[in-house]
Image (cartoon, grey):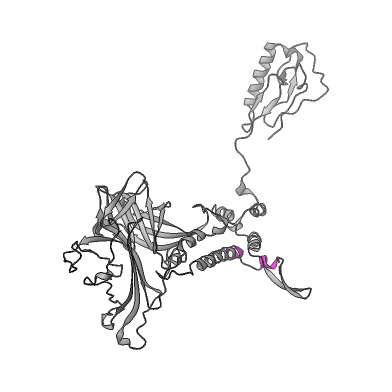
Amino acid sequence: MAPPYPASGCGSPHPAPCQPAAMAAPRGSTPPRSGRKAAPAPAGLGPQCSFNPAAASPSGRAAGLRNMSRRFAAGSRKYSGTVNAESLCWTPAVNSKSSVCIENMPSEMLIKVFSYLDAISLLQVACVNKRFYQLASDNGIWLKIYSSRFPAKRRIWKNGLLQMETAPLSCAAVEERKPGYWKREYISKQIAAVQVRVMQLVKPVDPYTGLPCKNQKAIKVSGLSWIIVVKDKNEKEHVMETAHLSFKDTSVSIFWDGTSWPCLDVLSTLKLFGVLSLFPDQSTAPSKNGPRRRSLIAEYYLSHLTESSAAVGSDKLVQLFSLNPGLVVGLWKGSNEIAFVMASLHYHQLLERSALGSATVQYSLPPHKPVLDDIDPEYGLHGYDLHLDMHSGKHACMCGTFRNLFCRKGDIENGYLKLTVVSLKDNTKHIPLIGTVGLSWETTAFKGIVKDCCMLDVTVLDETQKPFWCFSAPVCMELSSKVSNLYDYMGHIYTADYVDSEGAEH
């Protein structure tokens, strides 16, 4: 900002009027005798100001100010100025266009600025443009961050004892590595450290279900969350972040609602992702604008939702449609507008599926091959357990465990096996339902219950008590035409069928 240009006598109690030198002074007037020279005007503003005692009258002062304002207006367009009638000092205005831009700064200076940022801020700055990405990946910056988080140790002998001390940094560690090497090392080691902590939490197994008993705590520690991305027919993506979680014994239900859903007619696919913060230990509440990685869990096709999928239930406001695996889409009745989306995810390897996949490829579950009886292979499979849960999303409807299930070798065909759990004639193994069966839903403005519809969680354990087959999915209970043979039960019989994506019926 240019300093003001005071004229001679500017600070005096009775300042004299300022008049441009090009103006003709009255005849007989005395030249100014000030001991100081007038300050030069800025470039482009014309001749410098001088003072004329004869122009001290109000009319002469006004005329001088008018002429001066015309001179300023005719000057350079880069400046504009005002004249204070009391002090007669010209004050230039601030230039509205700044010529300083951070993108025009030298690379060395930007790297120095970036060196004061933390890891999360560096990753955010790298998204600005290609130049910032390259500078924010500087090995020197990331080696400093890496060493502060994972300091290198070396063994030394001190006073006859073997001790560990922090090894100093070397210039070779920066110069001999490719650009971005220490950035990738830091990120991968942070992810590995979080995974180790999470895997330690899921090691304790519930003997009742054969599943990790601290899933909820592990999800909180890892900062894991879930989002859905719907894509329209123009390839535009719409991300739904906010979700409500409901934890059960063997699964977690995730519920998305809102008013910003696109119309179903223009949608093509829906993808379910697990989202994990890259640095969950540095932020207690991970932001959606922070560095995160997605893991694809499932992809669903919505183009023919109402045609290809049978409705699993309805109430006065919504109609529910099921998509495998474990997804429920609620549509407002009388329109193709989405009311909500609900997903039910089984705990079996949930953290691996939600964190170890990529944005385009799902995590592949390791194959589990059944082992036939080691004494008599013709005996088939035996010693299997089934844990069954039925819930409405918030409340449990039924929960039970059936042990020592078996399957003859002749019942194993085309990769499928048949396990008979309960016989209608065996009253001792029947489990009563709790309350009224119905799937509850709730949006910002409405809520309801779809009767005879619920979430079914199935967990089958092999003879070693390891999960053999697990799923969680919506099912609809229908009235059966069969009549009960039990003498102490006179009620109706209901059936619930489930067909997985591979065509197996249950």
- Which residue is nearer to you in this view: 422 or 373? 422
Q: Nearer the viewer, residue 403 or 56?
A: 403
Q: Is residue 22 above or below residue 298?
A: above
* Closer to the camera in the image, 442 or 71: 442
Q: How many numbered marks does the figure carry?
A: 0
Residue 200: x %, y % from top left:
52, 68
Q: Magenta stretch containing residue 154, yes or no?
A: no
The furthest residue to the front: 488
> The N terminus is located in which quarter?
top right
Image x and y of residue 174, in percent:
66, 65
Q: Is residue 210 left or right of residue 167?
A: left
Q: How far from the left and from the top, in percent, is residue 11?
A: 76, 22
Q: Quadrant of the C terminus?
A: bottom left
- Vertical placement of 499 versus 106: above or below? below
In this picture, residue 103 sits left or right of residue 441: right
Quarter of the image holding residue 322?
Answer: bottom left
Taking the spot 63% from the left edge, 22% from the top edge, the residue there is: 70
Q: Where 135 falls versus 73 (above or below)?
A: below
Q: Is residue 88 visible?
A: yes
Q: Residue at x 62, y 35 (%)?
A: 95
Residue 131 can be seen, yes or no: no
Give x and y (percent) for residue 209: 39, 69
Asked if 398 appears above or below 161 in the picture, the reply is above
The residues colored magenta run 164-184
Q: Residue furthest right?
A: 35
On the picture, is 421 further left or further right than 489? right
Q: Report whether 271 appears left or right of 53.
A: left
